[in-house]
Image (tube, helix red, strand yellow):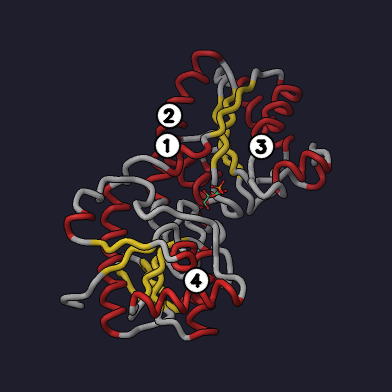
Amino acid sequence: MLDGAVVVGIKNGWRGLIEDDTEVLTRQSVTGILPRGGTILGTSRVNPEDDASIGHIKANWDKHNLNALIVIGGEGTLRAARDMWRDHQYPVVGIPKTIDNDLCGTDFTFGFDTAISVVTDAVDRLHSTAESHHRAMVVEVMGRHAGWIAAYGGIAGGADVILVPERPFRLSKVCEILRRRESQGRPFSVIVVAEYAQPHPEEDFLTPEQRTEIYQHGRLGGISFYLAREIERCTGIQARVTNLGYVQRGGSPTAFDRVLATRFGIKAVEMVAAGEWGQMVALRGTSVIGVPLDEAVNNIKYLDDEIYRVAEVFFG
Ligand code: F6P
């Protein structure tokens, strides 16, 4: 498979191809990266959006005499890959990598399993301190517009309430669950809330300014503080906040993510060898296949309703 090929690593995503920031990857230079978290090549939020950047990409592509581009990333990065194939016929193959697991076409993206293992560990630890101090612990997790991290991390950690963007929540319901637990001799709870989870319009407790700060600030986050305040006000139970933030995106990958990323990598190289452009590698069931990039980036993959119903069985 592609014997003798030179592999050029592009630093910081599309920015590296625009700015010609590259490094040849050899067996020696990639030895030992398997247990490392993050990305050794770096990342950026830069995508080729105008004629000037597309012009730079063409010049650098020719300079390095590239034959194919394997693009590893989430929705924004892969959408740009789709556009470069569809609009400019660059031979690209995509690999889905995001902790959010919100890409269509694949059951899982790599990074997600590692993130939920961090959430699970945190929820376990917070249960101990919630119980000792008789408190409600509100844990905010990432995931952008989808509730995958909250649902999987919450189920695995045995959270008492899980709030996700797909289901606007009623504060009255949350407080009812907490009060019921208290009356049953369990005056402690762990509430996992996704960064984009929102109160139901009929029970909205956020001012327009708070709403902007939490959801439209460019950077999501902050709902946990307002939720904890309201829980304390409604139930009289002391509430505390833990925003897990960027710890979810670091650390050594889990075995599942290492295997998935390795399988994705091999499949991507096979697709390059076969000239299967404009595709993304994907996990479907237990098989790794190719799917059109278009399918992956056209919509957000929201949390499966069936998973949320499983979580709900254990609320309270
Ligand atoms: O897309 C991954 C993600 O970690 C989201 O879950 C989170 O909202 C966002 O990135 C944070 O982005 P930034 O690193 O730009 O603050």
Secondary structure type for disc 4:
helix
Who comes first in sequence, dot 3 or dot 4?
Answer: 3
Who comes first in sequence, dot 2 or dot 3?
Answer: 2
Say which residue label 3 marks. Answer: 222
Q: Amino acid at mark 4?
A: Ala
**Residue 120: which disc?**
1
Position of 291 with respect to 167 (left or right) is left
Secondary structure type for disc 1:
helix
Say which residue label 4 marks. Answer: 296
Q: Nearer the viewer, mark 2 or mark 4?
A: 4
Q: Are marks 3 and 1 in contact (CB under 8 Å)?
A: no
Give coordinates of residue 3: x percent, y percent.
16, 76
Give coordinates of residue 283: x percent, y percent.
36, 66
Locate the C terminus and report the quarter of the image it occupies: top right
Who comes first in sequence, dot 2 or dot 4?
Answer: 2
Residue depicted at 31% across the width and 67% down the height:
8
Q: CA distance from mark 2 to mark 1?
A: 6 Å
Secondary structure type for disc 2:
helix
